Amino acid sequence: MPRPHPIVTPDSAEFLTEPMISPGGFREYDARWLFPEQINLPGFEAVGLALGTQMFIHGLRPEIVVGHDFRSYSGAVKNALTLGLIRAGIHVHDIGLCLSPMAYFHQFHLDVPAVAMITASHNPNGWTGLKTGFCRPLTHGPDDMAELRDIVMNGDTQDRAGGGYSVVPDAARSYLDDLAGSYQIKRPLRIVCATGNGTASAFAPALLSRIGATVIPLHTELDFTFPHYNPNPEKSEMLLDMAAAVREHRADFAVGFDGDGDRCGVVDDTAREISSDKVGLLLARHYCGQHPGAQFVADVKSTSLFTSDPVLRASGAKTDYWKTGHSHMKRRVQELGALAGFERSGHYYLAPPIGRGYDCGPLVAVELCKYMDASPNCKLSELYGEIAQTHTTPTLAPACPDDQKYDVLARIIARLDRHRDDGGTLGGHAITDILKINGARVLLANGAWALVRASSNTPNLVVVCESAEDKDDLRRIFADLDRFVHSEPAVGDYDQHPFDENMIEPQHSHAPAAK
């Protein structure tokens, strides 16, 4: 097969017949392209042929689960990918419209070794992409994605006989049956279910109704134009909308899902966002009572409370901080035999006996209901009030070009190293260590920390700061880190105001919850 052309030209005759793929779409643990500006349908066919070729290289049984999210073009993209897989000699099990965790589930349910999910996740309309993996519940990491990119861009593919295609009947029902099981909520719960008109609209409200919740729908009509906002429960527009619905309907809490349903955001009964790392901390406190000495994994953007929380410490629980990203986190959870992993972005990796190790937003919603059942006399806000108070910035994303961000980050880290070695401080606090697992997480003498890393999927850096003292301390720490970040001319403005008062956590007093 000839090499795909790296420049996509939609106004050309070749665009309808020749594969054209921007190689920059292959990222650390998935692929994302603007469609059709950066990839065309023959390009996706070439990706499918390359993915099938990669399966044979790795000695996999030639079967794969394939599904797609709810975008106007996702079905056509999936069909092109499927054609390439069949050409490669792979039998495709098509589960149709689905969430990413629904595709991961069917790897187990159908006993199929590989998965390919067409999704742009929470990216705006116009984007498409691919999440894929071979060794369930793992998904491709940087080496796997680089190998796939090289196979397709170098034209090192091979057509094989034996490919096939079948439609999986009742795929959605099997997934919802697995999530719900026989569980029924024991206490009455009114839950706002926010889906931002994305793919979760077809599944999440039905799941919550099935387990006995009173569901308050919020933008749960499928609409690929996303008329209100992109379904992204880490962004303020969706969280504030969820909070308003909680207030209006006097709900017990709200759950919000991103475009492909592998993330879950939470707002409590007082209409306050609980950042996902702290939702993870609440679940970890719940789980460690049943599993003393449990191992957890948290990504580098997550709160330091995982190491200081008295409930976790009393149970003998251990937490390992690791690289951000669903591929990195799944691998670490599996390597350590962890009970669960948590990311600040809203990915939760619940491993056996709770889940199967992949990220599933609807499963988190069910687990929150079980957590509430285990504390029948407490509201979610009261359970949240039991954990120590910290003040945390939102996850900030200063612009930085994709082709420069890693070099920019390396120079920022080098400056931070020299600053520490020279006895420098952040926010007036001595630097005790700099964790370089994923970017630089600067640990400070008062227990605060500040992170800068490169985004894996978008042209920006990522900045998060946390302090247990007060908002003024947080501001000072952020201001000092920001001077390092913006010492680089390539770094642009933040995607949101660093100190939006609606988004700094927490907004509750640290009072013991009523029992």
Image (cartoon, rainbow, N blue to C red):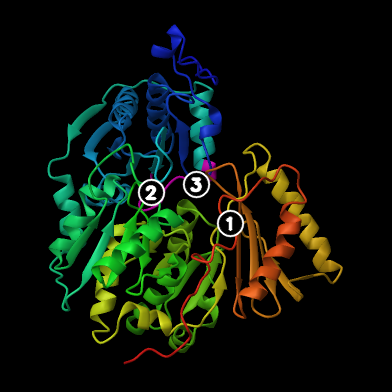
| Image coordinates for residue 107, horizontal then vertical, percent | 28, 47
- Residue picked out by circle 3: 141
Mark 3 or 2: in front is 3
The span picked out in magenta is: 134-143
Q: Is residue 292 left or right of residue 302?
A: left
Q: Secondary structure at mark 3?
A: loop
Q: Secondary structure at mark 1?
A: loop
- Work out whether residue 162 or residue 264 is closer to the camera in this orientation and state it: 264
Q: Is residue 55 left or right of residue 209?
A: right
Q: CA distance from mark 3 to mark 2?
A: 11 Å
Q: Is residue 494 left or right of residue 52?
A: right
Q: State yes or no: discs 1 and 2 in contact (Cβ < 8 Å).
A: no
- Residue 14 sits in quarter: top left
| Image coordinates for residue 110, horizontal then vertical, percent | 21, 47
Q: Amino acid at mark 3?
A: Gly
Q: Considering only vertical position in the picture, is 423 above or below 362?
A: below
- Work out whether residue 334 or residue 300 is closer to the camera in this orientation and state it: 300
- Residue 378 sits in quarter: bottom left
Residue at the (48%, 14%) spot, across then down: 2
- Residue picked out by circle 1: 497
Closer to the chain start, of discs 3 and 2, is 2
Closer to the chain start, of discs 1 and 2, is 2
Q: CA distance from mark 1 to mark 2?
A: 40 Å
Q: Main secondary structure of the magenta part?
A: loop
- Work out whether residue 425 or residue 227 is closer to the camera in this orientation and state it: 227
Closer to the chain start, of discs 1 and 3, is 3
| Image coordinates for residue 77, horizontal then vertical, percent | 34, 28
Mark 1 or 3: in front is 1
Residue at the (38%, 49%) spot, across then down: 135
Image quarter where the N terminus lies is top left
Q: Amino acid at mark 1?
A: His
